[in-house]
Image (spheres, rainbow, N blue to C red):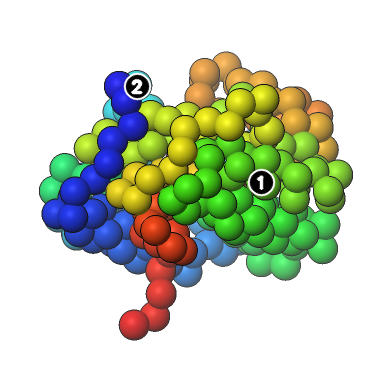
Amino acid sequence: MSVTIKSAKEIELMRESGRLLGIVHRELEKAIKPGISTKEIDRLGEQLIRSMGCVPNFLNYNGYPASICVSVNDEVVHGIPSKHRILQEGDIVSLDAGLIYKGYHSDAARTHAVGAIAPEAQKLIDVTRQSFFEGIKFAKAGCYLFDISRAIWEYAHSFGYGVVEDLVGHGIGTHLHEDPQIPNFPQRRKGIKLMPGMTLAIEPMINAGRPDVAWLDDDWTVVTEDGSLSAHYENTVLITEGEPELLTLYEER
Ligand code: MF3
Ligand code: CO
């Protein structure tokens, strides 16, 4: 499959898909507090998505058994919600969510603090988010894809953090995962030239320690090999001639 350029009509649908997902994330954030189970977060997310007339795109994707990926502390991504996993004060929790609106997918992730957390944990969350914004300085027509990859890595690495290399961002549209793959670390090649109408899910996953990851026996949950904390930040982004449009970032309006 090659990289798709969305038409004006498709861009409108991607915008609405993203706007709705931004609202889902805003609502999920409000629910994060000590005592909630990761299963309750998933149920709330699925209900919200369905109440919008949309479909959770992660549910049953390659057999993934839930609508929201909920990854706690040293879990990097793809944590499976469980009624036995209760969030505790001091935890950090990454929520990855996606939905389909009229056939168009959106995908976004955030890491949140559960109650009061250690300053080092907050710094990891903040640097991970900022690494995305450093990356998207190059998310515009005329730049090359791997400019984004390099900028993310350089920023996060400058804090001594480990940038996960085993998982990547991706194009998105009528499928959750479209070309191109978007690594979060430097490549020897430049990658494709970015063009208006491309929609990309850019998603740095950053570990406080080493970049290496492992998979739990459930074959989904990705954890840091060294047990260090990990954070995730992702938006679905529209490439334009000028500044990128962040389709999944909720804004008061
Ligand atoms: N946001 C993730 C991704 O981009 C989550 C999808 S994995 C799933 O790949 F299986 F849970 F859907
Ligand atoms: Co994604």
Q: Is residue 80 visible?
A: no
Q: Is residue 90 left or right of residue 63?
A: right
Q: Quadrant of the N terminus?
A: top left
Residue 176: image tag: none
Label 2 CA crowd tier, 10 Å (few <14, some 14–19, many 20+): few
Q: Residue 92 vs residue 32: left or right?
A: right
Amino acid type at circle 2 is Asn
Residue closest to the eye, 55 or 143: 143
Residue contact at pointers 2 and 1, CB within 8 angstroms? no
Camera-side residue of 65 and 61: 61
Mark 1: few/some/many CA within 10 Å (<14, 14-19, 20+): many
* Residue labelled 2 has its Cβ within 8 Å of some atom of ligand 1: yes
Q: Residue placed at 27% from the left, 41% from the top?
A: 5
Which residue is at 22% across, 37% downward?
174
Does residue 176 appear to the left or right of 93 in the view shown? left
Image x and y of residue 153, in percent: 71, 42
Residue on which disc 2 sits: 62
Judge whether residue 52 can be spotted in this image: yes
Residue at the limit of the structure toward the front, as seen here: 142
Q: Residue at x 61, y 26 (%)?
A: 189
Q: Is residue 113 left or right of residue 36?
A: right
